[in-house]
Image (cartoon, helix red, strand yellow):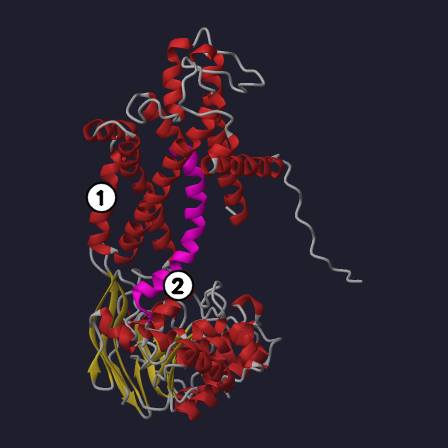
């Protein structure tokens, strides 16, 4: 009956419309891996079974077995908790610290802002992975030190993003109007600025989880992260090195998992950014 | 005198000397009156209004004196000014949609001033927000209070902003171009509403505008600003009847012709207002002034009294001048 219906937006020609749900499915599966690995994995991730050493993929062992006869699929499933869990912890800790730091800096302006941002520049000026290596090396090997060192190099990105957003948003008319009512800076930040910063931060967090996962596994691969027999994905790849030539599955499946995970988070981040209108 | 401004100068800090935007202006605002500051964009009128509430840009430098109810406001710590904003001095802006935060319901934002000053909170604040919406003649205030800004009309948003500015009971309201974004009928309603609220709440209003029509409607006294200086100041009727400053006269002529006889050629003021940092020597208006003489180019005219008004002009418009607007 109504003649003037809102015109439908032209369909996106790019395949993002298909990829985003697939990416979401991948993430749901990964979260299931991380939360209830025991219900999904057929075998123990650590128990040795020398009779089945380095067997290729089969129905009994989907991803094959490693040099200790352990089911690689089970190790990958249990490893999700370590690799993805640490990546998420790094990004959340960085975002939390970076948002507070950036918001304080942006609201303070003037010389305090200047000093705070020069400190951020210092962190940016240092090659990230080298800094992480140095930190991890100095406080010792382990997933905890990987998490700490990556958080140290990760938060400045959030601080800079949030500070820029705060500076942009504080000129908005509704912020001016709130200031004209005598609303305090803290309330202005909480009610009139941070709700708008949250959209940007959400996009960044989602995309960053993928990158953080790559960084965590890279440090483990370099021997600074998890200790054997923890089934962390980067460590699996490190352990597979002597068998590159003879047991391709040992390298390929953990590697594919890292790639799939990073891609899935990146795609979801993109679709969030597109929905926000960016 | 509720407000006394003396020698107020506002400049912007820049390497190689500050850029002056407002140059030693003085004026008084009387309790209960509607004081209109009129000028083109770049005249410094908004900057003057904002500085009364201590809301001038952080990069500006100010000097002089702004006394509100016998208290000096200029260059006071922001925390002190913050306690006054909303509670003693209210502000409304040009853009009613932008001035409301899209993520909170209208009533919640109106109650914010009460919470900020510790006057009420929770359900009590919400109830007073609804009462305030009723006072600004919004029909069905309880429903509007729970609506989001995009769900109500432009006129209602403007009313909601007025409610927001007045809920904590300020005695001075500064309205910066409050009618610019509105169409003619809503503009008239808005001015009427402001006049009614002024009577009911014993408000003093400073209205900042570039619209001569608004001036004619509501002004008790007028301050005409041009390029950061006072051109003419005084009783609204006196100035409207016989504008003495050539700039005021030109403003009046263009406004009247465009309203009364739309077919006649628009009598625009020749040239454009000078931008920041390019103010001419002498009288700032001289390059555009039909009556300018040599002294106008080199000497700044002092402000002097002429009947009910004070003006800064070496050669005021005489009664026989062609520029005189016939009302």
Q: In this view, does B95 lie to the left or right of B63?
A: right
Q: Is A6 drawn above or below residue A26 in the view shown?
A: below
Tell me which numbered mark, 1 or 2, is placed earlier along the sequence.
1
Q: Mark 1 points at which residue?
A: A118
Q: Of the residues tagged 1 and 2, which is closer to the observer?
A: 2
Q: Do labels 1 and 2 share a chain?
A: yes
Chain part drawn in magenta: A183-212
| Residue under the image location 48 percent in, 17 percent down | A252
**Which type of secondary structure does the marked residue at label 2 adopt?**
helix
Q: In this view, does A30 lie to the left or right of A6?
A: left
Picture coordinates of residue B293, whole percent (x, y):
31, 73
Q: Name the residue under label 2.
A: A191
Observer able to see residue A152: yes
Q: Is B202 drawn above or below residue B229 in the view shown?
A: below
* Front residue (pair A115, B262): A115
Picture coordinates of residue B157, whole percent (x, y):
52, 73
Q: Residue extending furthest right?
A: A1
Give the image quarter of residue B249. Answer: bottom left
Give the image quarter of residue A193. Answer: bottom left
Picture coordinates of residue A80, whole percent (x, y):
44, 31
Q: In this view, does A8 lie to the left or right of B245?
A: right
> What's the chain of the residue with tag 1?
A
| Residue under the image location 43 percent in, 84 percent down | B321
* Front residue (pair A228, A96): A228
Cα distance between the residues tagged 1 and 2 = 28 Å
* Front residue (pair A233, B239): A233
Picture coordinates of residue B281, whole percent (x, y):
26, 66
* Front residue (pair A262, B145): A262
Q: Within 10 Å of the Cα at label 1, are there few (<14), some (14-19), or many (20+) other Cα atoms?
A: few
């Amino acid at each position: 009956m109504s003649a003037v219906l809102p015109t439908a937006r032209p369909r996106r020609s790019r395949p993002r419309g298909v990829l985003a749900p697939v990416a979401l499915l991948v993430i749901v599966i990964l979260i299931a891996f991380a939360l209830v690995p025991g219900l999904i994995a057929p075998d123990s991730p650590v128990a040795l079974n020398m009779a089945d050493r380095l067997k290729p993929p089969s129905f009994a062992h989907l991803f094959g077995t490693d040099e200790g006869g352990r089911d690689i699929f089970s190790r990958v499933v249990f490893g999700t908790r370590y690799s993805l869990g640490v990546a998420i912890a790094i990004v959340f800790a960085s975002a939390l610290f970076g948002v507070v730091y950036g918001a304080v800096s942006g609201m303070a302006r003037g010389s305090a802002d200047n000093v705070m941002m020069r400190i951020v520049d210092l962190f940016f000026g240092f090659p990230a992975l080298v800094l992480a290596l140095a930190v991890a090396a100095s406080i010792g090997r382990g997933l905890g030190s990987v998490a700490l060192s990556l958080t140290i190099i990760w938060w400045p990105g959030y601080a800079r993003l949030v500070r820029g957003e705060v500076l942009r948003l504080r000129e908005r008319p509704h912020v001016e109007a709130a200031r004209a009512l005598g609303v305090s800076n803290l309330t202005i930040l909480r009610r009139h600025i941070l709700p708008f910063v949250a959209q940007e931060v959400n996009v960044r967090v989602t995309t960053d989880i993928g990158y953080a996962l790559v960084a965590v596994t890279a440090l483990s691969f370099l021997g600074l992260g998890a200790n054997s027999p923890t089934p962390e994905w980067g460590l699996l790849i490190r352990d597979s090195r002597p068998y590159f030539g003879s047991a391709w599955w040992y390298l390929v499946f953990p590697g594919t998992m890292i790639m799939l995970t990073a891609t899935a988070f990146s795609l979801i981040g993109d679709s969030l950014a597109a929905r926000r209108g960016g | 005198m509720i407000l006394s401004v003396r020698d107020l100068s506002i400049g912007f800090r820049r390497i190689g000397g500050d850029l002056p935007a407002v140059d030693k202006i003085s004026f008084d605002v009387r309790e209960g009156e509607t004081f209109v500051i009129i000028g083109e964009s770049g005249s410094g009128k908004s900057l003057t209004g904002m500085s009364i509430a201590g809301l001038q840009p952080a990069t500006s430098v100010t000097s002089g004196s702004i006394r509100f109810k016998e208290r000096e406001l200029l260059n006071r710590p922001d925390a002190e000014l913050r306690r006054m904003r909303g509670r003693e001095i209210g502000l409304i802006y040009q853009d009613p949609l932008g001035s409301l935060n899209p993520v909170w319901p209208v009533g919640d934002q109106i109650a914010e001033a009460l919470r900020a000053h510790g006057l009420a909170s929770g359900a009590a604040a919400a109830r007073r927000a609804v009462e305030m919406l009723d006072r600004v003649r919004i029909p069905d205030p309880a429903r509007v209070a729970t609506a989001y800004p995009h769900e109500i009309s432009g006129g209602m948003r403007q009313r909601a902003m007025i409610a927001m500015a007045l809920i904590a009971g300020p005695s001075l309201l500064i309205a910066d171009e409050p009618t610019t974004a509105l169409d003619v009928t809503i503009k008239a309603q808005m001015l009427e509403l402001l006049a009614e609220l002024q009577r009911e709440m014993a408000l003093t209003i400073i209205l900042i505008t570039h619209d001569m029509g608004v001036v004619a409607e509501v002004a008790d006294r007028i301050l005409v600003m041009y390029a950061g200086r006072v051109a003419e100041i005084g009783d609204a009727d006196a100035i409207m009847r016989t504008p003495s400053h050539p700039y005021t006269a030109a403003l009046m002529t263009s406004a009247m012709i465009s309203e009364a006889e739309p077919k006649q050629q628009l009598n625009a003021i020749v040239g454009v207002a000078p931008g920041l940092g390019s103010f001419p020597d002498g009288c700032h208006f001289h390059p555009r002034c039909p009556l300018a003489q040599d002294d106008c180019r080199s000497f700044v005219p002092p402000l002097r009294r002429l009947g009910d008004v004070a003006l800064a002009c070496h050669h005021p418009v005489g009664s026989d001048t062609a520029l005189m607007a016939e009302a």
